[in-house]
Image (cartoon, rainbow, N blue to C red):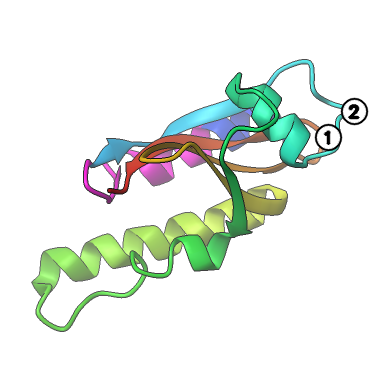
Amino acid sequence: MDLKQIETELKAATDGLLMLSETDAPFEFYLAENFQGEELNEETVLKLAGMPADYPYEEMELGYFFRNMTQARPDAGEKGLQQANRFQNLEKKLQELLQGVKVYRIGETQKLVLILGRTPGGEIAGLKTMVVET
């Protein structure tokens, strides 16, 4: 699968979907250009975010990150159920298209969120969004 197809599928999966936190933010396709041979670790992720080495950083599993969004509350109604289904679909799509997908949260209150993995061609790609947690 080529990079353009991965981008198209991720954009389709996130179209109109917002990352839920104290502020709702859209998802954007993300490609780490010129990082093909780099290890996907804290040092690389902080470089991608343009932050110093001692900046607040957290790494987590994709399922854990989406855990509250993939489950509809009983009182959420049809709209809540549809949204939970979209997040379930997004989680599956990320795992299907990218290898070794992880979530990286950078920052303190307003956090940059990078959901990254490797494409079949070895590029670092995924999604970018923001969360606010006070």
What residue lies at 27% left-to-right and 51% top-to-bottom? 20
Return the residue nearer the eye: 94 or 111: 111
Percent position (x, y) of residue 72? Answer: 25, 74
Residue 128 belongs to the span the image colors magenta: no
Report which quarter residue 125 is drawn in: top right
Residue 29 shows in this picture: yes
Q: Which of marks 1 and 2 is nearer the N terminus?
A: 2
Q: In this view, does 94 lie above or below 52?
A: below
82 relative position to 70: left or right? left
Q: Residue at x 86, y 30 (%)?
A: 38
Instruction: Tell me the kind of residue under disc 2.
Output: Gly
Q: Does 16 lie within the magenta span?
A: yes
> Which quarter of the figure has residue 122?
top right
The stretch of residues the image draws in magenta is 8-23
Q: Name the residue under label 1.
A: 122
The amino acid type found where label 1 is placed reads Gly
Q: In which quarter of the image is residue 55?
A: top right
SS under mark 1: loop
Residue under numbered circle 2 = 37
